Image: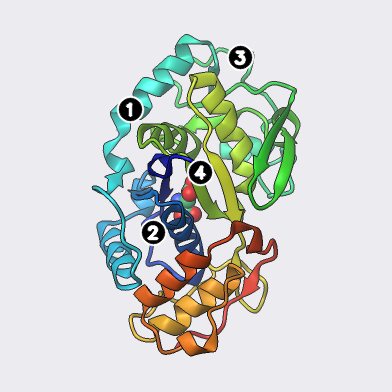
Amino acid sequence: MSDAQAYIGRFAPSPTGPLHVGSLVAAVASWLDARAAGGRWLLRMEDLDRPRCDQVSADTILRQLEVYGLTWDGAVLYQSQRDDAYAATLHALRSQGAVFACACSRSQLAQAPRNAEGEIIYPGACRLHVVPRNEKHAWRVRVEEVSAHFTDRIHGALQQNLAREVGDFVVRRADGLFAYQLAVVVDDAFQGVTHVVRGADLLWNTPRQVYLQTLLGLPTPAYAHVPLVTNAAGQKLSKQTLAPALPERGRRAVLAQALAALGHPPPSDLVGAGPRDLLAWATARWCIDNVPLHPTIAKPLP
Ligand code: GLU
C-alpha cells in the first residue's frame, strides 16, 4: 500500500482457553500481513461472553503470543470494558429504526430453517410484534432482501442474500450481553482497523458486519479469511474438539507447521531457527496469493 503507516491489522482472540495451532495460523497470518506492509498490529480480547471467558485464558494468550514472537502494538483492548460504546451504537440503531425487540425463545426458534453454516435463519416472527417492556428480549437488526457483495483477498468476490441466508440477526442478546457482530464492527472502527485477517470460519459473518458498517456510516476494512486447521476427523480445532494448547517447547516446529498451512513452508536450512528468525523470513516473503483455500490437518505437537 502506498502509505505503509496507514495499515492497521488486529488479532481478536476469545479468551475461553489457550491458543492452539488453528488460532496460531490466524494470528501468524494477520501478523505477517501487517508487518509485511509495515503496519501496526493490535490485540483485542473478545471477552464479551463473560460466562465463557476468563482472565487466566487472556493472560495465557498474551504469554503464548510473546513466546511465539508475535509482538503487538499499543495497549490490549478488552471488550468487557466497552459496554458504553456498544450501548451508544445500539441506541443509534434504535433511533434509525434499524432494530427491533425480539422475545423469541430458543425453543421457538429451534424449528426454524438453518443455513449452510448451521445457523438459524431468523423467520421474522417478532418483526411486526410489539414486545411488552417487561418481557426479556434480544435486539435484532432488520435485514433487507438484497444481495450483499464483498471481496475477500483470498476467496475472491462473494455474495450473500442476508434476508434469505441469515435473517434479522442479534446485536444484543436477551441476557443483556452485546453480540459479537455489533462489538466487532464498533471496535474495528474504534481501533482504525484497515485490514482484517482471520479464520475462514468467520467468512460468512462478513456480510453482516459490512451491513452494520453501512447502517452506521463506518468504513469497511479489507477482509482475508485464512484456512482452518482440523483434527484427523476433519473437525475444526477448538476447545470443544479438545485441541491441545500451543506448547512452549518445540515452538519452531509448530510455527513451521503454521507457516506451511499458510502456503509459506520454511526451507529446511531454517529448521534450526528460532521463532523470531522464522517470522522475519516469512515477513520478507509474505504473499497472500500463496495462501491456500483448503484447510490443513494438524500434525501431532512436539
Ligand atoms: N474471536 C474470534 C475468534 O477467536 C475472532 C473474531 C474476529 O477476528 O473477528 O475466532
Disc 1 marks which residue?
85
Amino acid type, label 4: Met
Q: How many marks?
A: 4
Numbered badge on residue 129? 3
- Location of residue 274 by image quarter: bottom left
First of labels 1, 3 by sequence position: 1
Numbered badge on residue 271? none
Amino acid type, label 1: Ala
Left or right of 48, for residue 135? right
Disc 4 marks which residue?
1
Label 3 environment density (alpha carbons within 10 Å; few <14, some 14–19, many ≥20) = few
Q: Are marks 2 and 3 in contact (CB under 8 Å)?
A: no
Is residue 103 something one can see in this rendering?
no
- Rounded to the nearest angstrom, the CA distance separating label 2 from label 3 is 36 Å
Residue found 63% across the figure and 18% down from its top: 127
First of labels 1, 4 by sequence position: 4
Residue 137, compared with residue 130, is above or below; it is below
x and y percent of residue 227 in the render?
62, 62
Disc 2 marks which residue?
16
Closest to the camera, between mark 1 and mark 3, is 1
- Rounded to the nearest angstrom, the CA distance separating label 2 from label 1 is 23 Å
Closest to the camera, between mark 2 and mark 1, is 1
